């Protein structure tokens, strides 16, 4: 049987999951982050140099981490909603995927189909991959979908108009709102905390919840992250490893040299995320 997906079942039970966005493509960093006590960690390949072989090491490091609290679930973001990439990340053991730039229900259905074996979808069959314990788990092909969590990312005006149709797709477990790309789509590039963007995100969280799916977001501003949680967001990343490291490094130097330390970021570090 495939490994129990704690993250997927927590979402189904309505539990809120606090996460960290990880963009440093290093198993060493992944192990460090995964032991810090967050509920989940996003391991990114869309806006990082990481690829499938690198991600294998990161997933192994996540599994080996000595937790500071509960075990931290790994969420992998492929570079695109592509069936070949999806197949490869599932085969190396990813169980939860965040698929970027899903614009409508057809693209959401394609994402789900790529995570299911024939009879339920189009996932290619490999007999000896890591996900099935190198072929030792004969039931994997029959039961893998039960522990696979599909999160789709809506990040444009056009996608937000399709929220209800996207959320209605069977097999979609959660809908993630991308504030940076959304703000650019709305004519406010680099301003993910623009009041119009905030209001649109609030409405999107409400609509995703009303559709019966888990809303998610990346929000590094602690007050705003709490607002999103209070409104019903279920999986919220409250920071980014690279940004936290960068800020700590600059503050450490400023403490010796004098001068003003840089302020903590009020949103995603780079609009691309």
Image (cartoon, rainbow, N blue to C red):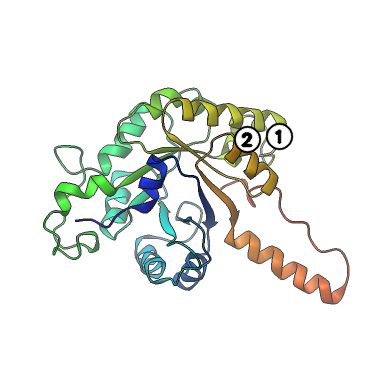
Disc 1 element: loop
- Give the image location of residue 209, x and y in percent: 48, 30
Residue matched to label 1 = 194
**Residue count near mark 2 (Cα–Cα under 10 Å), binned few <14, some 14–19, many ≥20:** many
- 193 to 144, vertically: above or below: above
Residue at 77% from the left image edge and 68% from the top image edge: 251
Residue 84, above or below 106: below
Please state if 69 lies on the left or on the right of 221 as rendered.
left
The answer to which of marks 1 and 2 sits earlier in the sequence is 2
Q: Residue furthest right?
A: 259
Q: State how far apart marks 1 and 2 are (Cα).
A: 8 Å
Res. 183 mark: 2
Q: Residue at x 51, y 53 (%)?
A: 47
State the residue in front, 211 or 89: 211
Looking at the image, residue 77 lies above or below residue 183: below
Q: Tell me which corner region of the image, top left, top right, bottom left or bottom right, holds residue 135.
A: bottom left
Q: Is residue 61 left or right of residue 132?
A: right
Q: Residue at x 60, y 54 (%)?
A: 239
Vertical order, 21 against 233 (above or below) = below
């Amino acid at each position: 049987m495939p490994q129990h997906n704690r993250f997927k079942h927590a979402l189904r039970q309505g539990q809120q999951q606090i996460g960290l966005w990880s963009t440093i493509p290093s198993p060493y960093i992944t192990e460090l982050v995964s032991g810090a006590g967050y509920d989940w960690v996003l391991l990114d390949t869309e806006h990082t140099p990481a690829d499938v072989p690198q991600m294998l090491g990161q997933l192994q490091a996540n599994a080996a981490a000595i937790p500071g609290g509960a075990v931290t679930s790994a969420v992998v973001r492929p570079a695109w909603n592509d069936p070949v990439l999806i197949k490869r990340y599932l085969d190396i053991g990813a169980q939860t995927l965040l698929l970027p730039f899903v614009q409508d229900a057809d693209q959401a259905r394609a994402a789900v189909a790529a995570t299911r074996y024939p009879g339920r979808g189009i996932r290619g069959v490999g007999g000896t991959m890591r996900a099935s314990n190198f072929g030792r788990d004969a039931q994997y092909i029959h039961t893998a979908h039960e522990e696979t969590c599909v999160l789709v990312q809506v990040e444009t005006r056009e996608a937000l108009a399709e929220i209800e149709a996207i959320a209605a797709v069977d097999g979609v477990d959660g809908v993630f709102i991308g504030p940076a790309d959304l703000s650019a789509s709305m004519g406010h590039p680099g301003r993910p905390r623009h009041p119009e963007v905030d209001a649109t995100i609030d409405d999107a969280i409400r609509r995703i919840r009303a559709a019966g799916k888990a809303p998610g977001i990346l929000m590094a501003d602690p007050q705003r992250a709490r607002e999103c949680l209070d409104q019903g967001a279920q999986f919220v990343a409250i920071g980014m490893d690279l940004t936290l490291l960068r800020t700590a490094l600059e503050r450490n130097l400023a403490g010796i040299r004098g001068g003003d330390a840089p302020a903590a970021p009020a949103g995603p570090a780079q609009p691309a995320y």
